[in-house]
Image (tube, helix red, strand yellow):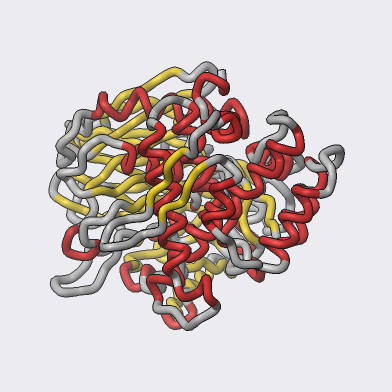
Amino acid sequence: MVGAPEPGPTTSYAPAPAQRGALWYQLDLTGDALRVRLRMNAPPAAASFFLPGPWAGQDDFDERIVVESTQGPSGALPMHLVREAGRIDVNAGDVAWLELTYRVRPPRAGEAHSRFHPRRTANELFAYAPTIFVLPSEGLARQVRDIPIEIHTPRGWNVSATWPPHAATTLSARGDRLITGYLAENVRTLRDAFVLAGEDLPSRRVELHPGTLTVVQSPAMRFSIDELTGPSARIVRRFMARYGIYDDVVAAILPNDAATEGSELQGMGRRGGFVVQVPPHQQMGPELLLLMAHEALHMWNGHELVPAPEAEAETRWFKEGLTHYLALKALAREGLVDRRALLRELAAAAQHYSQNPLARREAANDLDQARFPYDRGLLIALSLDIALSEASQGRVQLERWLVQLLKPHLRDTARAYDTALLERAFREICDTLGPEPVQRFERLVREESPIDPRALFTELNLHWLAPGGGGPARLLPIEGEPAKFDLLFDADLAR
C-alpha cells in the first residue's frame, strides 16, 4: 500500500486520539467490478464495519456491496454480515491487522439506478465516495487520521480524485497496472469525495497561486476542455480568495445518463471538488457556467457549512438559493455573463417563484416543492443584498455574511447552522448599518413573508414584466442610471 505504515506489534484497543495510518483502502479498477481492500491495523477484538448508508435521497447503495473475505495475518477471520442493519461484525481476536475485501457490483439489467450510483463502463469509472466505502464504526472512525487510499487502474488510464495526492502514479511490479496514492485527513474527508478514472481522460491543471485546479472531462463531451478551463479557474480563484483556500480542487465534467436522468443539467459539490453532469451535446454558455459556479461554491456553502439535520428543510433556501445567487453574482462580477443573461436568470427565478403554489401557501407537487427553496432563496438573497448595499453605500454586501459564518470554523470539521445561527451572523455584519437589513431578514426569513417581484426589482430600477401569452417573464431597465444594480453586479466595479 502506497504510504501505508507497516503493522506494528499487536496492541490492545484503547480510545487514543489520532491513530495515523491505522486504516487504509485499496481501490482496484482493473476488472469489471470495483474491488476494495480495507485494512485496519491493531483492530479491537470485536470490530464492526458499516455498509454505505442512505445518501442523496437513495437508500440502496449497501445492496451493491458483496463481501468476499475477512483476513488476518494467519488467515480467515470469523465474520457476520447483518444486511438489514448494514453491519459487518468481525471477530478479530488479538491480531496485528485485519483486512476486509469486497466488491461493488455494477447494476443488473433492468435494475433502477440514479446518477449517485457508481458508474462503470469499459473505459471509465466514476463514483461518489459515500457509495463505495465500507467504514469502521463511529468510535473507531473518530480516532483514525491520515488514511491512505491506493487506486489501481489499467495501463493507459488516468485518475483524478478530491483527496490530496500522496504518491505519484507508478507502474506496478508486474507492469500490468498503474498505482496512484492519495491521503485522506480523516474519515470525513475520505467520504466527502469523488473519484473519476478512465482511458486518456482530457485533463488540464491550472496554478491558482495559491492552490491548484484540475479540470477533467469525459471524452463523450462535445466541447473542448479548454473552453471550460479558463472560466473554471476564474470562478474557483475568486471563491478561494474570499472564502478560503483549498490546496487542490478537482472539477469533473461528465455526460448525464439519458436512461435515468433525462436531459437536464445536474451537479454536486464535494469537499475540494465539484461535478457537473450535462447532456453530451451541451454547448458552452451561461447555463453551464452557472451550474459550475453553483457547484463550486458548494465546496464552502454545503461542505464547510452544513445545515443541522433538524434545520435542513427550513434552511434549504440558504444552501441552494443563496448559493445560486452568489454564483450568478460571481459570474457577473468576473464578466463571464453579460447583463442580458443576468437579467434573464433573475427573471426566471422570479417567474418560477410567482407561479409556484407554495408562494400562495397552497398544496404543491414534488417538483414545485423541490424548486421552491432555490427560487425563493435567490429572491431572499437578492433582497438582503440590496438592503446591505444600500445601508452601507456598497461597502457591505451579501458575500460578507458567508465569510462571517465561515470565520470561526475549523477546516477538519463542518460548521452546522440553523436559522438562529444564520440570523446571529447576519446581525453581526449589520452592527453599524441601521435597522433595515435586520428587519428585512426577520420579515423574509423568520416570518416567511411573501415576496413581490415587481417591488423587489423596482429597488434596482428594473421593470418586471410578468409572464404572459406563453412568453417568459422579463426584466427591463427603467429609464435612468442603474447605479444600484451596477453596485451589485457590474464587473468593472468589482475590480
The correct choice, above or below, for 453 with respect to 80 in the image is: above
Image side of residue 122 versus residue 439, left or right? left
User: In the image, residue 154 lies at what x, y percent?
Assistant: 20, 38
Of the pair 113 and 51, the residue shown nearer to us: 113
Of the pair 153 and 249, the residue shown nearer to us: 249
Going 76% across and 41% down the picture, which residue do you hit? 408
Image side of residue 269 versus residue 177, left or right? right
User: In the image, residue 469 lies at what x, y percent?
Assistant: 27, 63
The correct choice, above or below, for 183 with respect to 321 in the image is: above
Image side of residue 209 versus residue 311, left or right? left
- Quadrant showing the C terminus: top right
**Rendering quarter of residue 422:** bottom right
Residue 191 appears in the figure = yes
- Quadrant showing the N terminus: top left
**Rendering quarter of residue 103:** bottom left
Of the pair 264 and 345, the residue shown nearer to us: 345
Going 67% across and 61% down the picture, which residue do you hit? 444
The correct choice, above or below, for 292 with respect to 418 in the image is: above
